[in-house]
Image (cartoon, coloured by chain):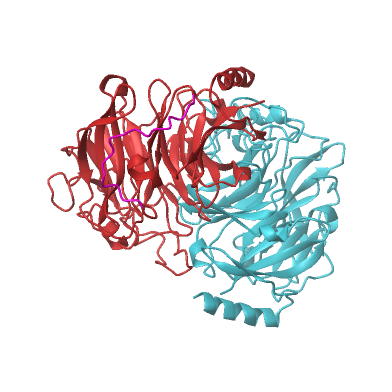
Chain colours: A red, B cyan
Amino acid sequence: MIRTALASSLLLTASTGVLAAQEVYETEQANFSVETIAENLNYPWSISFLPDGAMLVTERDAGSDGLRLIEADGTLRQAPVSGLPGDIVVNRQSGLFDAIPHPDFAENRLVYISYAQGTREAHRTALIRARLSDDLSALENVEELFAVNFDIATNRHHGAKILLDRDGYLWLSLGDGGDHMDEAQNPSSHLGSLIRLNEDGSVPSDNPFAGGDGGAPEVWSYGHRNIQGLVQHPETGTVWSHEHGPRGGDEINIHTESGLNYGWPEITYGINYNGTIITEERDREGLEQPLWYWNPSIASSGMTFYTGDAFPHWQNDVFVGALAGMHLARLETDGDRVIGQERLLEDLEERIRDVRTGPDGFIYVLTDSDEGRVLRLVPAE
Amino acid sequence: MIRTALASSLLLTASTGVLAAQEVYETEQANFSVETIAENLNYPWSISFLPDGAMLVTERDAGSDGLRLIEADGTLRQAPVSGLPGDIVVNRQSGLFDAIPHPDFAENRLVYISYAQGTREAHRTALIRARLSDDLSALENVEELFAVNFDIATNRHHGAKILLDRDGYLWLSLGDGGDHMDEAQNPSSHLGSLIRLNEDGSVPSDNPFAGGDGGAPEVWSYGHRNIQGLVQHPETGTVWSHEHGPRGGDEINIHTESGLNYGWPEITYGINYNGTIITEERDREGLEQPLWYWNPSIASSGMTFYTGDAFPHWQNDVFVGALAGMHLARLETDGDRVIGQERLLEDLEERIRDVRTGPDGFIYVLTDSDEGRVLRLVPAE
């Protein structure tokens, strides 16, 4: 099976703009090589796939010029997709974030995009929806669906991962805004929460604070530091997230119930990056424990469940990128449990910003730098 | 709290035979230093504690001379404890294994001991019980409680960890005998099973095959490769084990139900150490999935739940030694779940054979070599 997959990969390679085949990485559940699909991107933040295999890649630091298209044949279009809002603020962690097509994109051509909206001094995470033109060159009918109800000046901890689940809900992850960690404990503030909407941006009637009592109507859960991964388990349907934590506090959570408080900053396994203590409390009655946490921290970013056929032993495993940790984490799962962990791509010595399963069954990752790349893992003997 | 613990540690150090204080190891949940308590041991395999703080240490390769006593003041007695059986076979993985005092040792002075019994050509894991003399110098009233019902000539995969649980049951872990992996799937053979007895060696009436139908009466579970860790969770009371697996297949299991098949060698996450495939199957209906597995393998050996006060953030965490992996694994737990992993003592570059919480709240580990040492982790600033 692996040899067959390799053969088809080489055929594909020969017919596309793939830049260079790499050495073979041998691991206990799969052997693979790494191909460079695109390069010279300005802090690429998100990669997603259109039904025909074309890719949307965002460049965080390119702001309003940062929505890029890679053709299905692997060619990076030089002109960015036009039509992004003009109020994207680019500074430190602020910029253009996620760009995710609607599951029925082939019919409705809708794309959902998150970004830091405003100015360096007053900005917030916002979510828009737009139609992508037939030639994939422009956004049309841009409409704002949501914006955080708390302005910040920190240019940090925006969250901003988007998930369109198979039940038709639209999820947006948020962060605590950096200097506003206490707002994560306030469900009336969007900071530090996980947002759940209908696809048109309206509030589902079964949201925990839908009536506005006790919290903001859009809030599904709160007590989060900075959610940088948001996916739905392909079999159980459970929404999984991970948040980029303090030192020693990167963690994965699952979201089977609404209205829950995940504890930040009241409880955490981490300490501040300068070594000072946030809290001695690791757990408390009424606050959720993580499904998994990384110690030491990896600086988690991006997340995908692997659902392709190219790597049979990786089926339904979770892959998470590591920025400071400079690797790709593979977490073996058994339903909604993590039962093992492996580090991949350590030899690359690259910060990994995002990871996603492609429709071809290969795994795509983004490296995080001003010379960012799109890489693809393909099976090898 | 950490400073107080350090002060008491230094007092203790000054008054005992501790050989040398070491550098400080800094981790996110605790800082500690490592002290050498004893050295020049011949492949020490097990460490356990008597109520007054004295330690029983076995030397696998010293066989019938391998039961050693470290006084409560840290002094290693030069003369081994006498009275071990004369039929201990020492060869490769065969030898003297566990030596564990009864929970009521202060009253009954009973010790349980496992070893490879027989000859190089025909041997089996056996379990004996004896009285330790008042001066701690000799075993008396030695009685055999159990011996595996299948002789092997491989000198490999003996299991042999002993647990006396708080409900009064006596557990013994076994291995598949190395060249007899298929016997792990045969519940009538003791090979590859977990054994549960009453403290006197009789069979509990609620064992799954107590009547002898469908399996050996002593068997609690089967389908195990080589269980090298066996402990009871201090809060949930669940029995946890880990087995030293094939390459990529070291795993932790929990034992809440009897009569279960844990799958070896029908399913496994590992492959043979020479790289050949054991099976492509990672899971199958009716066979148990692990709670956790290590990928890549660490060569797991020894296990303890940390229950002391010296390291408050390590409370109830599981520690497992790594032989080939040459570190001490700390697994953060939440009840009967593993939610995180950390590697300690990597800088030592020593194979870790056993780990146990001492009555002083410190953590004791054995290094695996012909110059084996007893080390102790104590808090540091």
Specify the segment rendered in magenta: A74-90
Q: Nearer the viewer, residue A310 or B306?
A: A310
Q: Nearer the viewer, residue B60 or A150?
A: A150
**Residue at screen point 83% across, 58% down:** B42
Give residue A59's quadrant in the image.
top left
Q: Position of residue A359 (x, y in %)?
A: 45, 24
Image position of B189 with respect to A366: above or below: above
Split into 4 quadrants, where in the image is the N terminus of chain A?
Answer: top right
Q: Quadrant of the C terminus of chain A?
A: top right
Q: Is residue B121 visible?
A: yes
Which secondary structure is most common in the magenta stretch? loop
Q: Nearer the viewer, residue A51 or B60?
A: A51
Residue A342: image location, x then y, percent: 57, 42
Residue B111, position in %: x, y? Answer: 69, 58
Residue closest to the eye, B282 or B70: B282
Task: Give x and y (percent) for residue B198.
Answer: 60, 47
Whether residue B255 is visible, yes or no, is: no
Residue A94 drawn above or below residue B40: above
